[in-house]
Image (tube, rainbow, N blue to C red):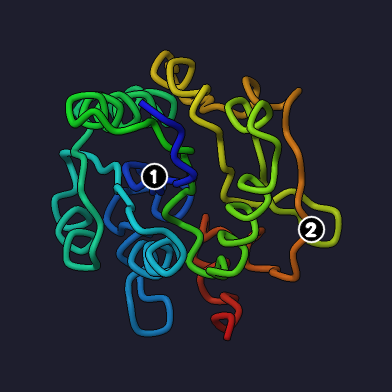
Amino acid sequence: MTEALEAVGILLAAGRGTRFSPDGTRNKLLADAGGQPVCVAAAASMLAALPEVAAATSPRTPEVAQALRAAGCAVLVCERSEGGMGCTLAQAVGALKAARLAARRPLPAWCVMPADMPRVAPATIAALLAAWRGLAPAGRGLAAIAPAHDGARGHPVLLGPDWTDALCGLDGDAGARALIAPHLRLVAVDDPGCLYDVDTPEALAGLPPAAR
């Protein structure tokens, strides 16, 4: 198989959102973000910049899966999501890897973003992809690239295909942050939305306008 300069989006949409609704009566991913659910707005940004986006969802929230499927995402229902974000990401990457290998397609870069970030600009995702494609071939495999706005690191993060097996081995709720930290390269973007997640009702109320 030859190298393909493509990336697949993974939208992490299996979280409980306990800070948003401690009693579990409201799902922040389905809260209204200017006319559409938070998770759908996040998916729209990824779908505008990437040809393929998979949403990793929980079996406990079929309405999230339904909304993201209708938005154009492939949906992966992650039975291990109760174990935390690391488990969710591992299961999602494992399923996508298996499908790629079965189809004899090269492994892509992985563009990973939480689904509670409805204001990430598609141009930010495009900038990460351009930065990755601009690397020398030897540097693409273990590339780890994230946006930065005003010096603060944001989301999503784009990981080269050589991270695939390490991602499949993640566990717990820590995700890939510690794994990639020594390798991370930041790309400056003019996008405050890359820093803005909807963790609380107050954050939702203060949601900035969508980037134009």
Residue 28, horizontal then vertical, whole percent: 38, 59
Q: Name the residue under label 2.
A: 188
**Of helix, strand and loop, which one carries label 1?**
strand
Could you say which quadrant of the image residue 191 lies in?
A: bottom right
Q: Residues within 10 Å of mark 1 (few under 14, many from 20)?
A: many
The residue at the far right in this view is 151
Q: Do the residues labelled 1 and 2 touch (CB within 8 Å)?
A: no
195 vs 105, left or right, is right
**Left or right: where does residue 108 sit relative to residue 96?**
right
Front residue (pair 45, 207): 45
Outermost residue toward the front?
Answer: 2
Disc 1: which residue: 10
Mark 2, other Cα within 10 Å: few <14 / some 14–19 / many ≥20: some
- Measuring from the top left, give residue 38's x and y in whole percent: 39, 67
Position above or below: 204 against 162: below
Q: Does residue 193 sit above or below 96 in this rendering?
A: below
Is tag 1's residue or tag 2's residue first in the polypeptide sequence? 1
Cα separation between marks 1 and 2: 22 Å
